Image (tube, rainbow, N blue to C red):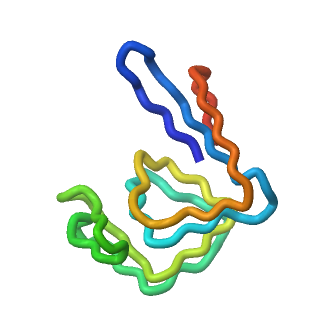
Amino acid sequence: MSLKQKVPVIGDITMLVRSGADKPLEGSNLVVNADALTGAGGRVTGVQAGRDAATLTGAPGVTGPKGTFGVQASTAVAHDLKSTAYSANGGTLTLEKLEIEFSRSGKQCF
């Protein structure tokens, strides 16, 4: 996962996070604000789509931005997931091994 952010005085900073292992990254109770999510297949259960993101209740204590298209699900498993996301909030991410790289090169996941 990667994040590119403009920081005052410094300029653009990129944070690149890798799991560093063959075991996939796992997450629960996450709210992801994204423009796109693509993958090589998977399974989603308990889908509720088209609600205002601010009304979603699947991740306790966290909602999406008011007036935006929202989707929530009970479970989601995706293979080779790529996302164009601008934030992820709440919940838990589990990684077998953690590697974090900060740079000004602009290098991102894809």
Q: Quadrant of the C terminus?
A: top right
Residue nearer the viewer, 32 or 84? 32
State left or right for residue 74 relative to residue 70. Answer: right
Look at 60% across and 53% down and name the residue there. 82
Quarter residue 55 falls in: bottom left
Rendering coords of residue 87 (x, y %)? 41, 49
User: Farthest left residue?
Assistant: 67
Q: Is residue 110 visible?
A: no
Q: Nearer the viewer, residue 75 or 110?
A: 75
Judged from this view, the residue extending furthest toward the bottom is: 46
Q: Position of residue 2 (x, y in %)?
A: 56, 42
13 left or right of 105 in image: left
- Which residue reaches farthest top? 9
Question: Is 84 placed above or below 106 here?
Answer: below
Where does the image place residue 34, in percent across and percent down from the top left? 42, 53
| Residue at screen point 62% across, 59% down | 81
Which residue is more in the foreground, 18 or 64? 18
Q: Is residue 66 above or below residue 9?
A: below
Q: Nearer the viewer, residue 85 or 15?
A: 15
Give the residue drawn at x 25%, y 58%.
Answer: 68
**Is residue 55 left or right of 109 when viewed as pictured?**
left
**Quarter of the view holding residue 90:** bottom left
Q: Is residue 4 above or below residue 98?
A: above
- Identify the residue at horizontal 50%, vertical 26% (top origin): 13
